[in-house]
Image (spheres, rainbow, N blue to C red):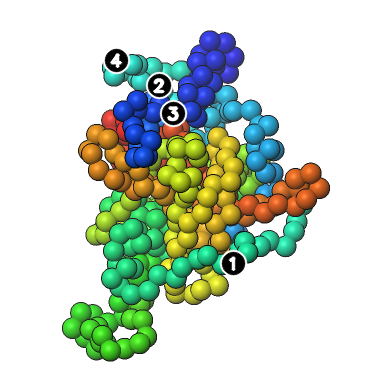
Amino acid sequence: MAGIPGLLFLLFLLLCAVGQVSPYSAPWKPTWPAYRLPVVLPQSTLSLAKPDFGAEAKLEVSSSCGPQCHKGTPLPTYEEAKQYLSYETLYANGSRTETQVGIYILSSSGGGAQHRDSGSSGKSRRKRQIYGYDSRFSIFGKDFLLNYPFSTSVKLSTGCTGTLVAEKHVLTAAHCIHDGKTYVKGTQKLRVGFLKPKFKDGGRGANDSTSAMPEKMKFQWIRVKRTHVPKGWIKGNANDIGMDYDYALLELKKPHKRKFMKIGVSPPAKQLPGGRIHFSGYDNDRPGNLVYRFCDVKDETYDLLYQQCDAQPGASGSGVYVRMWKRQQQKWERKIIGIFSGHQWVDMNGSPQDFNVAVRITPLKYAQICYWIKGNYLDCREG
């Protein structure tokens, strides 16, 4: 988009990238920044033909475009942002729709929304995801697994991980259900698994404190009612653009009744507590175990976080979170600021460098995901 509206939109993206930090935040108490959030609203919905569900499930996604490659990519124009944030919805009966969106910026007075629309719209390498000493922790025992924040991690029937972000919603990676061209096998009957004790309270083994073995757990499954995948992933097909949109939201057929973790806009890496991120997932080299890890962020772009958290396929889709001070409520709060996507290797001055990558929840992505959850942009004004 050209002209003044396009320049305003670009300026908005740049402001969102920096964030507006409260002047009252103390250096020893990392505080959630305040952002000026946009509004992403549906404009039109079109019915599509049923997919064939023919793709093989991939538990990771790779790209040879690293930090410098992504930093050299210009921010999307307004028309491109609308295109990437438009989305497909898949329903349990196999039907499918495509929804076009509009992007609005609320006036500073908090009045009506201002519409900025002026028209319509490689290489392969053996992947390693463990860096030196394996620093992952397997979480055992229902006292940990069934309590927050570990209880927010769930397993997808396609083999990935997801995170509870509302009473009926799960955030995960797009590649866990869609390969960029079509939906993966089993997506039409997609289920979400919740770890629970194998024995009911009072049953055999439930209170056996003398046992040296950790209590056995099992998955209880809930069917998915519908899924949302941004067109940026579908059009990008995991190339330089698609990697930025590797996220999806699942709506369950019934509430899960567990405490969930809110989503938040990803602050710059230098504002993260200790410069670290955390996430838990179901790595496939430790079947049945929930695996927790934390590590430093090594680099970032507007849409991605680069880090070397130890991970294996199966952890894809895990919610990346941090704990920061919420000044309005005067309390500490964890929020999901990204979605673990997968592995990248980059040729840096002739020396190959490995990274694990997470998709950042930018202000635009926050507005989109929040609207998917809430269905009302007025409930999505605080990131």
- N-terminal of the pair, mark 1 or mark 2, is 2
Q: CA distance from mark 2 to mark 3?
A: 15 Å
Q: Could you classify mark 2 by the number of other residues whose Cα lies within 10 Å: few (under 14), some (14-19), or many (20 or more)?
A: some
Q: Which mark is residue 133?
A: 1
Question: Relative to 216, is 274 above or below?
Answer: above
What is the C-alpha distance between the residues marked 4 and 3? 19 Å
The residue labelled by disc 4 is: 109
Q: Which mark is residue 19?
A: 3
Secondary structure of the residue carrying tag 3 is loop
Residue at position x 28%, y 52% in the image: 167
- Secondary structure beneath dot 2 equals strand
Estimate the x, y position of residue 193 in percent, counting from the top left.
38, 67
Mark 4, mark 2: which one is toward the viewer?
4
Toward the right, the furthest residue is 350
Q: Residue at x 30, y 53 (%)?
A: 260
Contact? badges 4 and 1 (CB < 8 Å): no
Q: Are marks 4 and 3 in contact (CB under 8 Å)?
A: no
Quarter of the figure with the C terminus: top left
Distance, label 4 to label 2, CA atoms, is 11 Å
Q: Nearer the viewer, residue 285 or 248?
A: 285
Q: Where does the image place residue 215, in percent across and percent down from the top left?
A: 33, 81
